[in-house]
Every structure is written in C-alpha cells, then in structure tokens.
Image (spheres, rainbow, N blue to C red):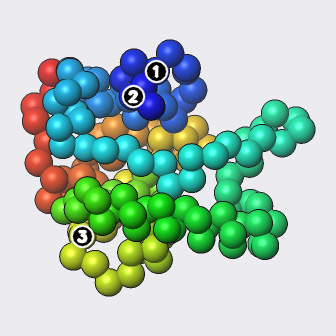
Amino acid sequence: MLGLACPRSEVSGRRLWGWARARFAEPERFHARFLVWNYCPLAFVEVSGRNRTPDKLPAPERRRLFEACDRALVRVAEQIRPTHLVGAGRFAYERARIALGQTEITLGWGPHPSPTSPAANRGWAPQFESALVQLGIHLPSSS
C-alpha cells in the first residue's frame, strides 16, 4: 500500500488520493485520522481488459468472495475500532452494514470516485466531503 506515493494512475485513485493530498498536504496528517481499506482488494479483469466489479461475478463466486471480504472487514474493525466507517459508494456501505451488523460504529457512505459513477463526474471531492461532514467527521482547512 503506497497511498499518496502510489505511482499508478487511474481515475478513482487519482481522485481519492488527490483529495487527500489537497485536504491534508502530508500523508502523515491524513493517515493519522483515516485508513483506506478496500473491501475487496482483488481486481477482476475481463479478456477485453475491462474491470469486472465483484458484484458482477457469478453468484456462487460472489457469495464465497463476499464471505471472505466480510470476515476481513470485521477483523479490521475489531483491531482498529473506528468511530466511523465511510463506504466509498453504496456497495461498500451495504457490505459494511451486512458484515458488521449491529455496531456502535457510525456507518455512512459518499460517492465512489469511479468515472462510471455519474455523480463522481460532477465534482467528486465536494460531494465526498459533504458526506463526511454530514456523518460528523471534522475536516481540516484545505492546504
């Protein structure tokens, strides 16, 4: 995990890490308060090169994958004990809600930074920040 130092460029990552850099300036400031955890850290690529999201996998594969990802998310939450968990997109929020069940963690979501999300193409960062603020997460002034 390279976070702000990641040399790979793709739109979702560029939006997320670009926002983190603009808002927090230094990686240490961001990581002191936030952890970015990918619900499913695997990439599924079709023969055409197109990304296949986990929700598009065949049902038996999807069920086994989600069970493993849910267990991993529960373990991370048990270790880190966050006050908030914010899904980047409704899918991540729903999986967190399912995996964590009744929890004292405040769950919420903001738009996913993917270019396939129409909302994300209309100013993702302000929308995401608005979601964080609505969940009671204080943000520092932009750097």
Measure the C-alpha gap from mark 3 to mark 1.
Answer: 29 Å
* Residue 130 left/right relative to 44: left
Residue at position x 57%, y 53% in the image: 40
Total numbered badges shown on the rendered structure = 3
Residue at position x 67%, y 43% in the image: 43
- Residue 97 in the image, given as x and y percentages of width and height: 41, 74
- Residue 59 in the image, given as x and y percentages of width and height: 77, 72
Label 1 sits on residue: 6
The answer to whether residue 30 is seen in the rendering is yes
Residue at position x 40%, y 34% in the image: 16
In terms of image quadrants, where is residue 18? top left
Mark 3 lies on a secondary structure that is: loop
Mark 2 lies on a secondary structure that is: helix
- Kindly identify which numbered label has been placed on residue 22: none
Residues at badges 1 and 2 in contact (C-beta under 8 Å)? yes
Residues at badges 3 and 1 in contact (C-beta under 8 Å)? no
* Residue 63 left/right relative to 16: right
Label 2 sits on residue: 3
Residue 79 versus residue 41 in the image, above or below: below
Q: Nearer the viewer, residue 30 or 20?
A: 30
Label 3 sits on residue: 105
Q: Earlier in the sequence, mark 3 or mark 2?
A: 2
Q: Earlier in the sequence, mark 3 or mark 1?
A: 1
Mark 1 lies on a secondary structure that is: loop
Residue at position x 47%, y 77% in the image: 98
- Badge 1 crowding class, 10 Å Cα cut-off, few under 14, some 14 to 19, many 20 or more, is few
Q: Tell me the kind of residue under disc 2.
A: Gly
Measure the C-alpha gap from mark 1 to mark 2.
Answer: 6 Å
Measure the C-alpha gap from mark 3 to mark 2.
Answer: 24 Å
Q: Tell me the kind of residue under disc 1.
A: Cys
